[in-house]
Image (spheres, coloured by chain):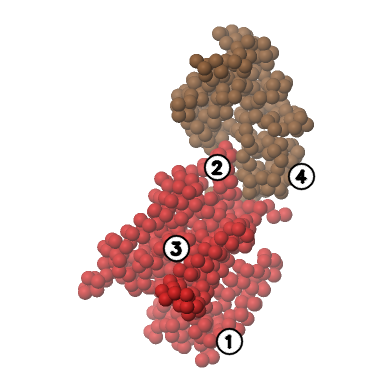
Chain colours: A red, B brown
Amino acid sequence: METLILIKSVLLIIPIVLLLLLLLPARRWRLPMAVVAGVVLAFALSASLPSGILAYSVSFAIMGCVYALLTLGLNIQWGYTGHLNFGVAGFFAVGAFTSALMTVEAPTGIAAQYTQMAFGLGLPFLVGVAAAALVSAVVAFLVAVPVLRLRMDFLAIATIGVAEIIRLIFQNERWLANGPQPLRGIPQPLRCLVETQGCGWLPPWTTTVLEPLTPRDYPLFYLTIISLFVAGAYLLMERACRSPWGRMLRAVRDEEASAAMNGKPITYVRIQSFVVGAVIMGIAGALYAHYTVTIDYSHFHALFATFLVWVMLMLGGSGNNRGAIIGGFIVWGVWSGTAFLANAIEPLLALIADDLPRRAAYFRWLLVALLLAAIVLFRPQGLIREEKRVSRYLRE
Amino acid sequence: MTRETEESGGPHGKTSRSDDAVLLKVQGLVRDFDSLRALDGADLEVHSDTITGLIGPNGAGKTTLFNVVTGFHLAQGGRVTLNGQDITNLPPHRIFRHGLCRTFQIPREHQSLSVLENLMLVPIGQQGEGLFNAWLRPGAVRRQELANRKKALEVLEFVDLSHVRDEYARNLSGGQKKLLELARTLMTDPTLVLLDEPGAGVNPTLMHRLTDNIRYLNRERGITFLVIEHDMDMIMSLCDPVVVMSEGRQLMTGSPEEVRRDPRVLEAYLGGQYATVEG
């Protein structure tokens, strides 16, 4: 039992350190502080929390990371460039299905009658993620060329339409990715570490060391993987946004005509930012698919995959990558928390009318909508506002 | 550069100089907005090293001319050449790279950027504007950023905005925004700068500084200016020659004195356009 807690603690270290790095202010002592506190916290949490709560927290954090990535992508598009993209779900779906098709083995024999897919290449996880990024980029580019001529509300309507088209294609085209039926068996990276036979390509001692882990503990590995993806995306985006590239985006957002007169190719800039944002959303989709193992079209409704992301970005702070990630986690927390709340008030609703408890789910949306209204009214700039200085080379 | 002596010739009393000194040449420009013909075969020549004035009653097509020349609106007819190169209907950023800058009648600063970064945005060839350079070549980007910062600080010093360099540009006063517009054009080495009503809404002191700056830049840095302005005192003291537009066409060109005396100019301002509307 003790070794199990030890292993769990070690696996929690990277995600917790990364989280602390995100939350602590940028000071000289940030890195050592985060490492020390992260190690202590990791051991304290895995030793003190009941395993059920720990497992729930881990799965919560993984979905938080998926949403953090979506919010980061939207931040490039809306926060930095002012693209009113209401089609986040579309790129999320493209990424998820692309990675699934690349990594699932095409079914043979009798299974092929139940699962139809255009192809199933059985390639490694990272290839799937890379393909998801690439295909999202291509789709975003094809969408951007006609659609980015539109501004603001028209762009929003067009992107909703595109996302719905993408979802309906995956719903109706059976040959592509099993149509209305779910696509199952998406492989999970490093899953073999928790299986009894271990990973063939790793030295045998890993199997011995990880012996106490059961498949139920797999999300701990996935949390480390996905939090590294979030950190990588954050670092890349932050570096790009805090350089002349980000300044150009903000200039185009503020005043297009003037940016053009300052020699900036605005159409190219707008397409570039749209594509970069969509690539991150596509990667989020891929990481979601590999986590849930089974995906179908219904996972990509605008409510979950677009509007929730918008609330996250509005809360965290448009134009601030740190804010985007934090907003993603907070709103995901609110959303998950309201599930308990909705359950708790069901008896109360039953007193009012018999059929109200069945509609308790909508109560959650009501709360999210209220949250959005409160943000817009009381803190329109979000929790962490956009920084005045763009270029990181200007620190004196 | 050889310049023929100015002669008063042609039906419009046009001041003509040798062709190689013509920096900007606009020929027969046409532009409609729905049924309104904003430019109706407009011609214009701007000679190197001049400060050319562009005046005319409201609706004469002056700003539309600027917009078409700088690529914001497409020309439906006619030709624009800069330094002998055809720039008709190129996109604005390409025209900018030919050394043509403009300012806007109503300043269009980048509100969420600081005054300093409004200027640092401008220079051409910034490596950090490429995504991969921003990721992989921070050293080169840093060198350029520091050089551009130095230049921006010099320009801010010149237009006397150093004290507000870290303010959001949206917080500047109207006059300061006008100065920022001028400063923007100095971040590159433009050959021709189009100023759209630089004096509108600017108090007399600031106006003096503005005209002094324009004169200085013209004399010391060899920048040619084309200035739209309604303030006749400013035009008369600053510009030579002055081009008069009316109803989408050039009415005449001449020295400020000639323009002042010409009866057609007076008619265009006072009655001409109303007579046509009625007809």
- On the same chain, marks 3 and 4? The answer is no
A329 in relation to A388, above or below: below
Q: CA distance from mark 3 to mark 1?
A: 36 Å
B99 on left or right of A134 = right
The residue tagged 3 is: A303
Q: CA distance from mark 3 to mark 2?
A: 31 Å
Camera-nearest label, 3 or 4 = 3
Q: CA distance from mark 2 to mark 1?
A: 55 Å
Q: Residues within 10 Å of mark 1 (few under 14, many from 20)?
A: few
Secondary structure under tag 3 reads helix
- Indicate the amino acid at tag 2: Glu
B137 in relation to A262, above or below: below
**Chain letter of disc 1?**
A
The residue tagged 2 is: A256
- On the same chain, marks 3 and 2? The answer is yes
Q: Sequence order check: which comes first, mark 3 or mark 2?
A: 2
Q: Residues within 10 Å of mark 4 (few under 14, many from 20)?
A: few
Which disc, if any, is residue B163? 4
Q: Nearer the viewer, residue B264 or B114?
A: B264
Camera-nearest label, 3 or 2 = 3
Residue A12 is drawn in which quadrant?
bottom right
Q: CA distance from mark 2 to mark 4?
A: 27 Å
B32 in relation to A328, above or below: above
Q: Are circles 3 and 4 on residues that touch, CB within 8 Å? A: no
Q: Are circles 2 and 4 on residues that touch, CB within 8 Å? A: no
Secondary structure under tag 2 reads helix
Q: Residue at x 54, y 71 (%)?
A: A333
- On the same chain, marks 2 and 4? The answer is no
* Residue B200 drawn at (x, y percent): 68, 31
Q: Residue at x 52, y 63 (%)?
A: A369
